[in-house]
Each structure stands twice: as C-alpha cells, then as structure tokens.
Amino acid sequence: MSANNAVNGQRFKLGSESELTYRLKWEAWEWLYCVARCRCIGLEVRLQGPWGSIVDVVGIGPNNTIHAVEVKVSRSDFARDNHTEADIARLRKRAGSLARRVELADAPDYRTAAGDLERLLQEQERLRDRLATVSTKFHDSRFLSIADYHHIMAPRGVVLAEMLPDGWGLLEPGPREVVKAPAKTVRKNGGIMANALRAVARANAAAMMRAHGVRWSEDGAEFPRPGDERLPAYVQRQQTTDET
C-alpha cells in the first residue's frame, strides 16, 4: 500500500480522548457491525436532541434496532456515571449540612481556628465540584428509553458482571459480548427513527470534517485552505503529489 493510501487509524480520534478510549470505540464499532449487524453506526452521537447526552457509539441494525454503547476505560470512569437519584439526594443533604457548619464556624460567637474554617471550605468546594459532575446516566429512565439495547464496553476486568446496572450488557475487547444486554420496549415511530438516523449522520459529518481540519467558531465552520497547517498530513501529501 502506498504512503498516500495508507490507513490512518487515528483519523477520527478526538483530541481530548485517550488512545485506549479510541481503541475501545472501534472495538464496539466492530461488534456492532459484525455481530449486531448494524449498518448505520456513528461515534459521539447526540440521540436526545441538541442538549441531550452524547453516546460514545450508536448503531442501528435490522428492524430499526438501536444499540447504545458507552465506553469506560477504568473503574473510576465507570463509577462516574453509576449514580442514582438517591445518591445525589444524599450528596445534597451532606452539602446542606456542611454549609451550616461553615456558617457556624465563621459566626463571631462561634468562630473556630482559621485552619478549621479553611478545611471546611475546601471540603465544601470538593463537594460542590462533585455535585456538578455526578451523573446518573446508567440509571436515567430517559437515557434508557433512547435505545433497544444498552452496552458498556470496557477492558477485561474493569467492569464485572455483578457490577452492571439494570438494563445494561457488557462488551470486552475482542470484541466479545460478556453479558447480553436485555431488550427494552422502546416507543418508535417514523419520526423517532428519522431523528436517530439524522443524529448518526450529523455525528459522522462532524467527525469527517474534524478529520480534515475543519474548525468551528461563532461564525460557523472554518474550512482549511491549501497550505494550511491544519490540514492532515495525508491530505498535504496528496496535494504535493497532485502539484508535481
């Protein structure tokens, strides 16, 4: 294979994601294509509208069956989305209690040592950050209603079968299905399927444009021009070949 036609395995990798995350996404893609027989597949798909959650990999297979795959590279990554509304309620209760302690510690009649107050303020800040980032995705009924099957793709041993949230299956590199995802009863009509197909198409269009150096600003998409350093190396090589 010539240099100009060589496969670039990193072409659709997001700048913010790790090599492992990207590889697991393609493992999921392979499973969706080869096993689930999906022929419409996309990465980073926003199935719930412009403000909804982004799904790592989405596949649409025979009989309009929708598969949603979430990639988790570590146990802490998995735990981040594995919270329930009860967990959030407990965190909010703890935050309220901590706020009262901070208020009391800073009151003139009860003022404690500066170090104690600083410790409470730091704890309050950590709790505030945690509340801002905590996710109930794995247990969210709205998220679970967007696909017929939900899968977690993770390295072997990171997510065990007994750790899986209700309604989820487990995939591992190979790729192979470790735990079969239970089928859900999803309300689907022509409009819903059209939205799902459009979401995958939009995700793939954005991925293709990023791979070719397109950037987005407030004014819209900015396409690179010949000689622009943003152009991928394989495109620059092709231009050089065409000019000679």
Image (tube, grey):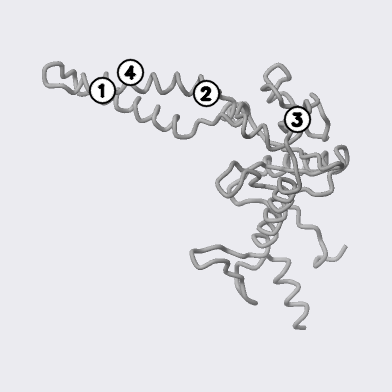
Spatial separation of the CA atoms under disc 4 and disc 2: 18 Å
Q: Residue at x 38, y 19 (%)?
A: 94
Which mark is nearer the camera, 2 or 3?
Answer: 3
Q: Residue at x 74, y 40 (%)?
A: 188
Residue 107 position, x and y percent, is 16, 21
Q: Tell me if label 3 and label 4 are in contact, CB under 8 Å.
A: no
* Label 1 element class: helix
Quadrant of the image for the N terminus? bottom right
Spatial separation of the CA atoms under disc 2 and disc 3: 23 Å
Counting residues from the start of the chain, the first of labels 2 and 1 encountered is 2
201 versus 115 height, above or below: below
Residue identified by numbered label 2: 85
User: Residue 118 versus residue 171: which sits nearer the camera?
Assistant: 171
* Label 2 element class: helix
Query: The disc labelled 1 sits on which kind of residue?
Result: Val
Spatial separation of the CA atoms under disc 1 and disc 4: 9 Å
Query: The disc labelled 4 sits on which kind of residue?
Result: Ser
Which mark is nearer the camera, 3 or 1?
Answer: 3
- Is residue 42 in sight in this rendering? no
Residue identified by numbered label 4: 97
Q: Tell me if label 1 and label 4 are in contact, CB under 8 Å.
A: no
Q: Residue at x 72, y 38 (%)?
A: 68
Residue identified by numbered label 3: 185
Q: Tell me if label 4 and label 2 are in contact, CB under 8 Å.
A: no
Q: Residue 27 vs residue 1: left or right?
A: left
